[in-house]
Image (tube, rainbow, N blue to C red):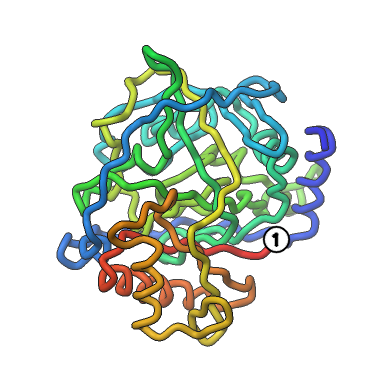
Amino acid sequence: MRIAAALPLLLACAAACPAAEHQAPAAPKPLPSASADPLSALPTVARVRPQAVEEAAGDELAPGIRRVRGRHVALEGVMNIDQGPVDGLEVLACLKDGKIHETLIRLDTTIGQLVKAACIESLGLTVDGQPAEEGTGQPARGIAVALEVQWRGDQGWLGVPASALVRDRVTDTPYPALPYVWTGSRFLALHGSGPDGQPAARQQFMLDSTKSVAVNFDEPDALFASPFPGAVNDTRFETNSSICPPPGTRIRLVVRRCELPLTLALADDARLSHAGQVLDDAALSALLAAHYGAGAKPALRAVGVQVERATNRRQDIAARTRLLAAAAHAKAWVVPVFVVGE
């Protein structure tokens, strides 16, 4: 499928899904103390460092957008900052004219619909998720994807999981390798006046409005949502200056499909299960210890939670709380990401 074919599919998805109404964002919540934060109870894990990687090249679909069909999409850009910002690292990567005062990576492209179309065409990410609702603490639901930042070093190309370039001010540590969550951004019904001067609504693809491609904070209009618990407050996040290349460094943000080490199922009644077996607390801790505990070397430190779209989203918050408590008991550094069927 070419980009020209992917764009009609993008527009068809918009027509099939009712547009959300625009709402003002909620006021930011205060940061928790380290002693009260569930991530502080997780064990220390080895810090991620840049490694030699194969350059993610590919055919140019549009300026700043490359791909190898069935393998990856590579978005070209530059490192925007290498420390801070004081008021929080809300955005991992933005379009060229996005919110650069709080963004780690400034991409070359200016067109969000082309970025989404490239992911549809190259990775088969045709199903949109359910975005996080800003200020509520409800995590996004979608498809887990691996984001890697690559740049050319003195001895060749280097790469690092994008999450490792983010540092948590509450726990005073950078994050390990985590997936981000494809939600596909969203269309909103924006109200204004039509040509005749009468009130009229139009659908707006919000990525082209907010320009936030991948975020650390719970911003509902991003293409790739945050994997981080505590993303309700953007001041929690800052640049991991110890490994971040300097501003102006040319980079590629590489998007790939990924497999999570473990996926559980979340039922309407909040029960978690695996392979058809309902998990009590002891069984849940044992599973997490086996996949993410001492001696385990998972490629991604995230457990998938498969959830039906119609399930009340408050169940996600309860499941996240239970999983983080079980991870602390299991001495396993792992956080949940919520995934929906394709």
Q: Write down the residue under mark 1.
A: 342
Q: Is residue 136 above or below residue 3?
A: below
Picture quadrant of residue 331: bottom left
Q: Where, quadrant-wise, is the C terminus in this rendering? A: bottom right
Q: Is residue 243 left or right of residue 23?
A: left
Nearest to the observer: residue 295 or residue 175: 295
Give the residue displayed 65% in from the left and 26% down from the top: 66
Residue occupying the far front of the picture: 295
Nearest to the observer: residue 219 or residue 77: 77
Picture quadrant of residue 325: bottom left
Give the residue displayed 47% in from the left and 72% down from the top: 316
Q: Is residue 329 above or below residue 181?
A: below
Q: Is residue 330 above or below residue 199?
A: below
Residue 208, position in %: x, y?
62, 38
| Residue type at the position of mark 1 | Glu
Q: How many marks?
A: 1
Q: Is residue 66 above or below residue 196?
A: above
Q: Is residue 3 left or right of residue 80?
A: right
Give the residue displayed 58% in from the left and 72% down from the top: 307
Q: Where, quadrant-wise, is the N terminus in this rendering? A: top right
Residue 3, position in %: x, y?
78, 33
